[in-house]
Amino acid sequence: MRAKNLSIAFFVVAIFTAFEGCQQIQPYKILPLGHGLPTTHPVHNAMVFMANRLEEKSGGKMKIKIYSDAQLGEERVLTELIQIGSLAMTKVSASVMTNFAPEYGVLETPYLFKNPEHGYRVMEGPIGKEILSKGEQFWLRGLCFYDAGSRSFYTKEKPVLHPDDLKGLKIRVQNSQNMVNMVNTLGGSATPIPYGELYTALQQGVVDGAENNPPSLFTSRHYEVCKYYSMDQHTSTPDVLIISTRVWNSLTEQEKTWLQEAADESAQEQKKLWAASVQESMKEMRAAGVEVHTPEKSPFVDKIAPIIAQMKEERPEVYTFYQKIKAAE
């Protein structure tokens, strides 16, 4: 795995070096952006929208080259490449960002937002901007949040209608201690696995299920293996568009303005794309034989109470953001 990551790193360095060379003879700047999603995903389409808007705003002086489908590596690898400036931009889950800036961990708190509108107001307002700034000391500047919907459990053998149904089940989670703690607290056995390896892991029985939003479940084709989707909607952890501070600091003030405006506009476009994608994904998965269940949330909410208590005691900087979000209108 280490050798694979090194190979990817050298490949990306070569790409970025080539782009820098081109920029010396071309009248525009190219920003390479790598991510792990398929081209059918609404977040990818939002980034295409951003690339088009940036080129329009800059009059062709700035362009974004997008590498999808984990061509340049999984989220953790891409984030590390951002840190050293070998890649300009990427999209990661806020869960991945907790490994660098713990304040992002508040966004993984189960049942954090009152409703989707509350979440949008928080992410697009002062609280969201403050969280985005927390990665800068680690060379990771947040540009905006992308809606990743609500995450729910999907399983192979039976639906999850109550926390007790998770007992004995190995559930894939992202590489985040907060997500590990949540699944384990609910009674399951959390198993971190890279997203790109999950389909095979489900097929081979390495894990019994996973948790994600409807578009990701559909576009990944995990529904071909897991026929039970339990809409407990335990978390609404957003995606984060990040740029290397090394790259950001190399831009002029005008270039920074163009890029930030394009990113903000893409976030608004992504919300529309996301809503349409959720509706279409649910329709297609039901047609493919997936059983969709809506369990009562209160037993799940009661079960995760120790997580909030532990946050307050052990992570006061995260609990402060939790209080701010809960108090926000």
Image (tube, rainbow, N blue to C red):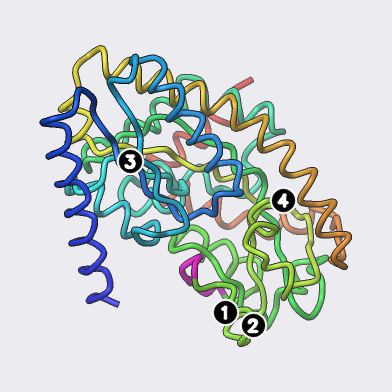
Closer to the camera in the image, 246 or 149: 246
Q: Residues within 10 Å of mark 4 (few under 14, many from 20)?
A: many
Q: Residues within 10 Å of mark 3 (few under 14, many from 20)?
A: many
Secondary structure type for disc 1: helix
Which label sits on residue 233?
4
Residue at the image position 59 percent from the left and 73 percent from the top? 199
Answer yes or no: do the residues labelled 1 and 3 have beta carbons within 8 Å? Answer: no
Give the extent of the magenta segment: 190-196
How far from the left and from the top, in percent, is residue 84? 17, 49
Which label sits on residue 203?
2
Which circle's residue, 3 or 2, is located before the other in the chain? 3
- Mark pair 3, 2: CA separation: 32 Å
Closer to the camera in the image, 242 or 165: 242
Which label sits on residue 89?
3
Residue at the image position 22 percent from the left and 40 percent from the top? 139
Answer yes or no: do the residues labelled 2 and 1 have beta carbons within 8 Å? Answer: yes
Disc 2 residue type (three-letter): Gln
Q: Residue furthest front?
A: 25
- Mark pair 2, 1: CA separation: 5 Å
Which circle's residue, 4 or 3, is located before the other in the chain? 3
Secondary structure type for disc 3: strand
Secondary structure type for disc 4: strand
- Mark pair 2, 4: CA separation: 24 Å
